[in-house]
Image (tube, coloured by chain):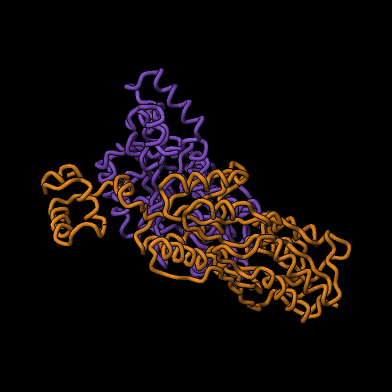
Chain colours: A orange, B purple
């Protein structure tokens, strides 16, 4: 049974039947009921492409996925998508993933928006002065940024965590334990979140009269191997740091291995904190020596972004435009008093 | 510029212009050129929903993503999707992800297929006698199964690894080192791959006159915490195994932690092999004591499945219907002679 057949059976035009099925107000209640009953009896299922033309709704969210042969799918992105999926399922939405070269995401966003396949989209992996914000605004579809863009006014819809506070709180905790020699294993500083974290650490250390040597500020991809290499480089320095901050538990996994490989004891010879996105794969409390962390769930961010986008698309919910979440400091055994 | 305006400008019907843009043969070469030139000059971009109705092509692959509040996004699924994304990008395809309750994937597949949003789809996480194979075949769209379904004839398009050989090869290696007391940390045995792995281990051990006690055959989710708990349970047994097989490096991460926590030495007191999906996050060669593995890249499987699906959709490539890959045994330091 297709739309044409259903319409002929009812003696109505295809437009009327389509509008009745999609709840348009210009169709009378009596006609609407007649159409819905016939659709149910005959098992008619609307063709989504046709329905989309009629209603202008795809019930779909758009996401751009950075992809290239040397850019492996990121577990952090996966955890975020898991939250988006949970809410999409609840609201009978699906989502369209547009793979894009990381250097060519703008094209992918334009294509998503012009495709007619999505009702709204999300912009992530923001950089400083990111041109995608102005572009996103020009496309005429609801969007939300996951993160902020240093240098731009905060006048676009966004959800972010307070990344300055992430490293500031960790430095505070280390200072209170008497540490004076610091090192950073940050994420790639092409991204806004990493720039803000570094700034948070530098500002707090400056107040304590400590200047961070650029040579101990490492910015590397969020993987185990990179964490291992970065920590090894820090430990090989003549004046090695006693307090190290990591940007992800994936980096911390390698960093801890580098500490163990040198026969040093975590929490005694060297203290380590890490930001924890609450990845189910890597629980900081499960490390042999549990890790001190700042924690904020990426899955919760995916859930919230999907809820906000769907709410705006359906026009029935109002949310604050800018939400900045504060991560929680959780002290465990990986941080201890500075060694003498 | 929309289709209507472009058509009026050219003095052609919208149908003719749409068919010309989409390369339909019933439009003359001269008209086609005229339309394409005008489209280029005016910067006309076709509306994808309209284009889809005209051509019946969405340039899109469908994937079902198992999702529920207690089912976190799986890094293994993410790695597979990363391969699908790489090939989709290359061929100018995107993909549609339909989140589904793991107990209700059939509905999600039906919705994907009937939506008109995808040109083909993939079926994964297969179980024994899986009803989704017959259903997938009935939907009239190209599909590929990732995996097999015990109990069904091998007459559907699929890509799988030889899962019997995965554990058989690992057992063979352990037997050659003199081990006689075995334990399994398998994936959830509701899935075909885990059933086959267990069978591979049991068959090979039976030939050596060894019966696996069901109490040492643990089937758990593929996470660090589950690996830790399963290995702890094995090590707490009065007659503890000297040779343990894991189904994933994520389980092995926790299993190694459990071994260390008891002061046992990996590769001497207890030998461990794991299947390695080549997750960039967890490299078995990077463990403090590098792990012996059977290796097969999940990303490569995603690449191959996307290539095959797109090839069939575009009608220009022919592939074998059933491909079964053999994983490679790589011996490292986590396996050693059986202790006396």
Front-lying residue, A236 or B57:
B57
Q: Which residue corresponds to the image point at 29% horizontal and 44% vertical from the top-left?
A: B136
- Residue A227 location, quadrant: bottom right
- Residue A216 seen in render: yes
- Give the x, y percent position of residue B90: 52, 36
Determine the residue located farthest toward the bottom in the rendered image: A176
Quadrant housing the N terminus of chain A: top left
Classify residue A164 as left or right of residue A110.
right
Compared to A91, does A165 lie above or below?
below
Viewer-closest of A180 and B273: A180
Q: Looking at the picture, how far across and down is residue A239, in whole percent?
A: 88, 65
Residue at the limit of the structure toward the right, as seen here: A238
Up-down: is B164 above or below A190? Answer: above
In the drawing, does residue A74 fall left or right of residue B158?
right
Residue depicted at 72% across the width and 73% down the height? A168
Q: Nearer the viewer, residue A137 or B120?
A: A137
Q: Tell me the quadrant of the picture where the C terminus of chain A can be found.
A: bottom right
User: Does residue B198 appear in the picture of this structure?
Assistant: no
- Number of marks in the rendered image: 0
Side (left or right) of A232 relative to B277? right
Compared with A320, B176 (above or below) is: above
Q: Give the image location of residue B61, x and y in percent.
A: 40, 43
Residue A57 in percent (x, y) is at: 36, 53
């Amino acid at each position: 049974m297709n739309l044409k057949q259903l319409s002929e059976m009812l003696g109505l035009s295809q437009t009327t039947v389509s509008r009745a099925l999609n709840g348009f107000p210009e169709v009378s209640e009596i006609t609407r009921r007649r159409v819905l009953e016939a659709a149910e009896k005959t098992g008619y299922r609307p063709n989504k492409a046709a329905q989309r033309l009629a209603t202008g709704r795809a019930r779909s969210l758009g996401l751009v996925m950075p992809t290239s042969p040397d850019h492996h799918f990121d577990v952090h992105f996966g955890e975020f998508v898991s939250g988006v999926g949970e809410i999409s399922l609840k609201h009978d939405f699906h989502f369209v993933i547009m793979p894009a070269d990381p250097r060519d995401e703008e094209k992918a966003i334009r294509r998503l928006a012009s495709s007619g396949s999505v009702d709204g989209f999300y912009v992530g992996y923001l950089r400083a002065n990111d041109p995608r914000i102005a572009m996103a605004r020009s496309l005429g579809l609801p969007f939300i940024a996951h993160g902020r863009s240093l240098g731009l006014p905060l006048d676009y819809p966004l959800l972010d965590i307070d990344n300055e506070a992430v490293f500031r709180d960790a430095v505070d905790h280390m200072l209170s334990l008497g540490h004076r020699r610091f090192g950073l294993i940050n994420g790639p500083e092409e991204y806004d979140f990493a720039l803000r974290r570094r700034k948070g650490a530098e500002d707090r250390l400056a107040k304590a009269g400590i200047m961070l040597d650029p040579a101990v500020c490492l910015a590397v991809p969020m993987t185990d191997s990179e964490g291992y290499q970065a920590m090894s480089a820090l430990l090989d320095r003549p004046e090695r740091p006693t307090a190290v901050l990591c940007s992800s538990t994936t980096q911390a996994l390698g960093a801890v291995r580098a500490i163990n490989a040198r026969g040093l004891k975590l929490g005694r010879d060297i203290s380590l904190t890490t930001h924890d996105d609450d990845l189910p794969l890597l629980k900081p409390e499960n490390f042999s020596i549990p890790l001190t962390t700042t924690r904020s769930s990426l899955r919760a961010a995916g859930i919230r972004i999907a809820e906000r986008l769907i709410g705006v698309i359906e026009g029935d919910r109002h949310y604050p435009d800018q939400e900045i979440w504060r991560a929680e400091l959780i002290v465990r055994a990986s941080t201890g008093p500075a060694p003498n």
